[in-house]
Amino acid sequence: MRRPRSVRDADVAGKRVLVRADLNVPLEDGRVADDTRIRASLPTLELLRDRGAASITVASHLGRPKGPDRSLSLKAVEERLHELFDGEVTVLENTRFDPGETKNEPGLAARLAEGQDLFVQDAFGSVHRAHASTVGVAELLPAYAGLLLERELAELGKLLGEVERPFVLVSGGAKVDDKLGVLRNLGGKADTVLIGGKMAEQLRGESPLGFPVELPSDVVAAAAFEPDAEAKVVPYDGVPEGWLGVDIGPDTSEAFAEAIAPARTIFWNGPMGVFEWPRFAAGTKAVAEAVAGADAHSVVGGADSIRALADLDLVDRVSWASTGGGAALEFLEGKELPGVAVIPEG
């Protein structure tokens, strides 16, 4: 696996450093609701501080604005970063306020690079996009991988090589199309593939996969897509007309947990149902607890799966909770990540 050169090997003393971090965090009432990604950026910033960087400037996007949008300003994020980081750091405004960001326009890249001596890419969640702040700047300044980016590539990369068995892959969520590449690339080498959520319904007909998967035997069905809707447990093929499957059932939860327990390698991406509503979170909770309890190299990806772990205070009990949703999927699918490819090898 290609390894980009590391910020550990960069001479940063007295240098002005631009860091592309992933500060794309949820906001509520103008405040940071979850600072997980901000905290994940701290080790690289602390290394630069401790090694005498003359200045540290952080660039990031937040959301998907079509232009300047006060509700997606990084001001609240900057405030939280200053609370967490003991040192001087400048945070630029949301890079996506400029339409040149997503177009990788040379002009924006040049403005970002102006006055900087080197560039550190630490936003794993954005390296699958060839944007001005991920690729353009790296073509103008000496570029290095940050500590978070390094760790992400190392932990996810373990799944692509020889793994300890049994290897269990757990996938859920709403759309199989988003994860089809990963399922094809990793599922074939897994000993067991467990599928829940809306994905299970999509795969129950003509599966595009060339290997067997385990699907729910029972589901929690709801009369409407509402948190307090009438609900009951039914066989997978017994969902009443007009009702919706909103979680895997108790039999499936138990079976999935039993399949996960002996695993030595686990990759989990996607909830088993509408876990945001407590009445329909039991299946996702059962999977999260089984993954966290297994004596395995366990890697969890996807914002929903990470949130489920966080809600149960289980993040520290898995080997790696990836900060990169789409980037992690593309990496595990075997695709080249533009923001990584542009950094010279170490």
Image: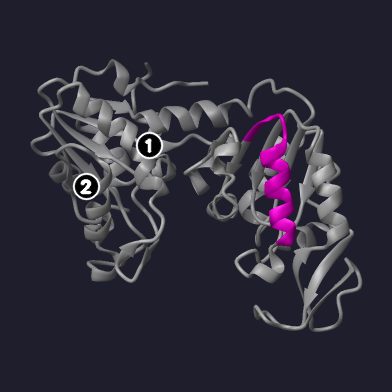
Nearer the observer: mark 2 or 1; the answer is 2
Q: Can residue 140 be seen from the camera position used here?
A: yes
Please rate how many residues cluster around mark 1, counting C-alpha atoms within 10 Å: few if below 14, some from 14 to 19, many from 20: many
Q: Residue at x 77, y 35 (%)?
A: 188
Q: Can residue 215 be seen from the camera position used here?
A: no
Depth order, front residue of 321/313:
313
Q: Quadrant of the C terminus?
A: top left
The amino acid on which the numbered mark 2 sits, given as a three-letter code, is His
Residue 76's image quarter?
bottom left
> Principal SS element in the magenta part?
helix
Q: Residue at x 54, y 51 (%)?
A: 310
Q: Which residue is mark 1?
A: 339
Residue 270 point in image, percent of width and height: 64, 53
Provide the secondary structure element on which disc 1 rests.
helix
200 relative to 68 in the view: left or right: right
Depth order, front residue of 75/286:
286
Residue 290 in magenta stretch: yes
Q: Which residue is mark 2?
A: 82
141 relative to 147 in the view: left or right: left
Residue 286 point in image, percent of width and height: 74, 52
Residue 88 point in image, percent of width and height: 14, 39
Span colored in magenta? 282-298
